Amino acid sequence: MKKNVIVIGGSGQLGQCLSEVVAVKNDMFSYVFLSKEDLNLVNADEIAKLFEQYKPLYCINCAAYTAVDQAEEDHDRVFEINEFAVKRLAENCLAHHTTLIHISTDFVFNGSSSIPLTENMDASPVNVYGLSKLKGEQRIQEIMDQYFILRTSWLYSEKANNFVKTMLKLAQSRDTLTVIFDQIGTPTYAMDLARVIVNIIQNDKQAYGLYHYSNEGIASWYDFAKAVFEFAEVDMKVLPVASSAFVTKAKRPHYSVMDKTKIKTVLDVEIPYWRDSLNFCIQNL
């Protein structure tokens, strides 16, 4: 009999990528993908009923409030989803002996570092979204032991809305774009992250804890945009601009390159270079 895996946020970008990965070969597990229409994360009774119904071996939480600027004003809602709903998920996971795989973010860091960020470095977010995600991580760690928290950054794929698709869409109506050059991080192909998650499940990994995962290498948003147009063979003039030229409600970390040594050594994960994964994605698009 197949074991159940429930995917919260199943209709989002990472959820769609997971659905594609598990559709290829999956003999041991039955994956249940739940959209926000299927599950109201702020309703404790709905979450409890879900766990009673499926008694999942794993719960993958891809759901989050991710509108970074809007979060500055929508304070109650962002914490309800990114902290308190996560707390409820963790409590139900504990009660049902379910392993929780939770997706977090590089935005838990303040961006002042000049060296790649390890899991044991202090997290001190510079915006409400980052703080809410950090609080969610802390709730999990307070409640349970059987969890994998995967911090990631700059997610894109063929699915949903993301930076890559926005760039290609803008290219249809413009011949020049200005893109920020002084925010440094690493793009992450969501299909690569989805494969890591499925690998954890399929191989019954039990080295629980907090991990960093993005693709290899370093880029600015300017570098990222230049590579998108290079691989898509689009003739676009991209001009570098300082982040100070864009006034946003939420501050962004200037440097959020994550060190992936732990996930590579402890979970035996091979990580592709960001340009290779981006090229693959764009050829698919």
Image (cartoon, rainbow, N blue to C red):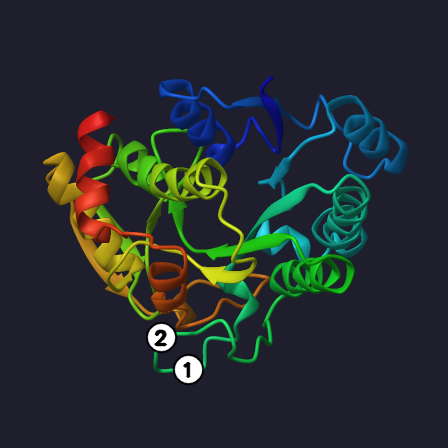
Give the camera-side residue of 238 and 145. Answer: 145
Which residue does the image show at 64% across and 46% down from the upper left?
Answer: 100
Q: Residue at x 61, y 67 (%)?
A: 127
- Badge 1 amino acid: Ser
Whether residue 228 is visible, yes or no, is yes
**Residue 113 - label:** 1
Tell me what residue is drawn at x 78 percent, y 52 percent.
Answer: 87
Q: Secondary structure at mark 2?
A: loop
Return the residue nearer the eye: 2 or 160. 2
Q: Residue furthest front?
A: 1
- Tell me the SS state at disc 1: loop
Q: Nearer the viewer, residue 214 or 68?
A: 214
User: Residue 170, image x and y in percent?
Assistant: 30, 36
The C terminus sits in image quarter: top left
At label 2, which amino acid type do we have?
Pro
Residue 206 in picture, x, y percent from top left = 54, 52
Q: In screen coordinates, is 115 left or right of 72?
A: left
Measured along the vertical axis of the image, is residue 23 above or below residue 204?
above
In the picture of the structure, the residue carrying the numbered disc 2 is: 116
Q: Are marks 2 and 1 in contact (CB under 8 Å)?
A: yes
**Callout 2 environment at 10 Å: few (<14), some (14 to 19), or many (20+)?**
some
In which quadrant will I find the N terminus? top right
Please give left or right for residue 269 compared with residue 124 in the image: left
93 relative to 18 in the view: left or right: right
Q: Quadrant of residue 140?
A: bottom right
| Image location of residue 41, percent across then percent down | 77, 37
Neighbours of disc 1 within 10 Å: few (<14), some (14-19), many (20+): some
Residue plotted at (56% across, 67% down): 108
Name the mark on residue 159: none
Q: Name the one closer to the observer, 193 or 94.
A: 94
Query: For residue 114, what is the image quadrant?
Result: bottom left
